[in-house]
Amino acid sequence: MTPAPSPAELALPIVDTALAERLRERMATVEEALFGHATSRAPYVTEAARHLLAAGGKRFRPLLVLLAAEVGPRPDAPEVLTAACVVEITHVGSLYHDDVMDEAELRRGSDSANSRYDNLVAILTGDFLFAKSSELTSQLGAEAVRIQAETFTRLVEGQILETVTPGPEDDALQHYLEVVAGKTGSLIATSARYGALFSGAEPAVVAALTEYGELVGTAFQLSDDILDIASETEESGKTPGTDLKEGVPTLPVLMARASTDPGDARLLELLDPEKSDLANDVDLHAEALGLLRKHPAMEEARAYVVARAQEAKQLLEVLPEGSVRSALEAFADVVAVRSA
């Protein structure tokens, strides 16, 4: 059986020590609750459901729920803690499905669920966690059920769209950004929304933080795209170039493909699935990864991500200046330039 978790450090620096301590205590409560919720009558199911939870992670989504709740008069409402568990369990459930789709071998530095068990168990465990998140959401009332259903619809649509190749007349980058908004932006938007909503914030503040979360979520996924290429396994806990290997056209790849520089002919050839088989040729994959890491598209992609974070920070002008607003601004910055 997976041991009980120990309180984790916050995933971002917070200058206000009192705010940091409040968040740290509540995150420890959430961490404990997550393992309690990922429990089945069958020990084997419990083990599988806790596998990726035990692997750790930044816990950005529940932290954002708790941080966004600080904008309202009731940041310590029990509904806030429940909502924090809802978003993280939903996210972790999606990771089980992601790893099957990507055929990933590592997740957060540990064996992916499909590697440790098999694809069938990984898929069903993801379904089990989605069911658990639905049970929790029902405790939050009809409005939360509606929000969660809409969020889950967008998340699954994003997953499906990721498997669809844009047509010759479609904008490949725009298509991909729609995928990102669904797969990642939707749940992070809901994280910020839940925190503000269940702490009793004004409707205008809830709306602003929902949009903030959407932009932060987009930046989060796009920075993950950059990490997939730029970082080594010991930094990110993932296998480098997984998306590249599977032919997923992420932000740096799409920007590189737009190059008209004759010097990029070899890279463009490697990125063309009709001309090279990166999934099955280790040497070609390594060559493409090396060329991409040195390509200007990497800096272009980083600049794009930072711009989205800046847009998110502008939405925070609805909040009074202070430690909570500063922490939300720092959250956007950390997401945009993270290294793991």
Image (tube, helix red, strand yellow):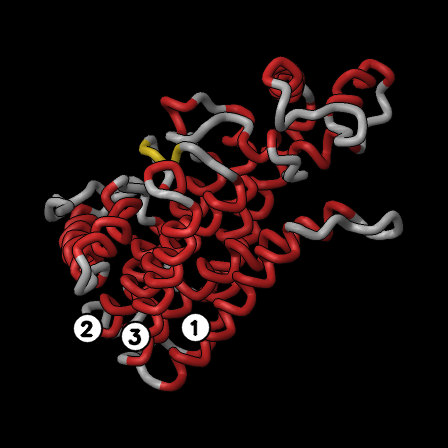
Q: Quick check: can you spot residue 322?
A: no
Position of 316 compared to 47: left or right? right
Disc on the earlier residue, 2 or 1: 2
Above/below status of 329 relative to 267: below
Q: Find disc 3 in the rendering and name its residue.
A: 135
Residue type, numbered disc 3: Glu
Closer to the camera in the image, 318 or 215: 215
Residue type, numbered disc 2: Pro
Position of 134 compared to 162: left or right? left
Based on the displayed image, in which of its 4 quarters is residue 260 positioned? top right
Residue at figure coordinates x 54%, y 55% from the top left: 183
Q: Which mark is residue 148?
A: 1
Above/below status of 290 relative to 272: above
Residue at figure coordinates x 15%, y 55% from the top left: 32
Q: Residue 29's spot in the image, x, y percent?
A: 15, 57
Q: Mark 2 near mark 3, Cβ–Cβ under 8 Å?
A: no
Q: Quick check: can you spot residue 258?
A: yes
Quadrant of the drawing holding the C terminus: top left
Closer to the camera in the image, 313 or 214: 214
Disc on the earlier residue, 2 or 3: 2
Disc on the earlier residue, 3 or 1: 3
Q: Residue 36's spot in the image, x, y percent?
A: 16, 60
Residue at figure coordinates x 65%, y 25% from the top left: 278
Q: What is the secondary structure assignment of the residue under circle 3? A: helix
Closer to the camera in the image, 270 or 264: 270
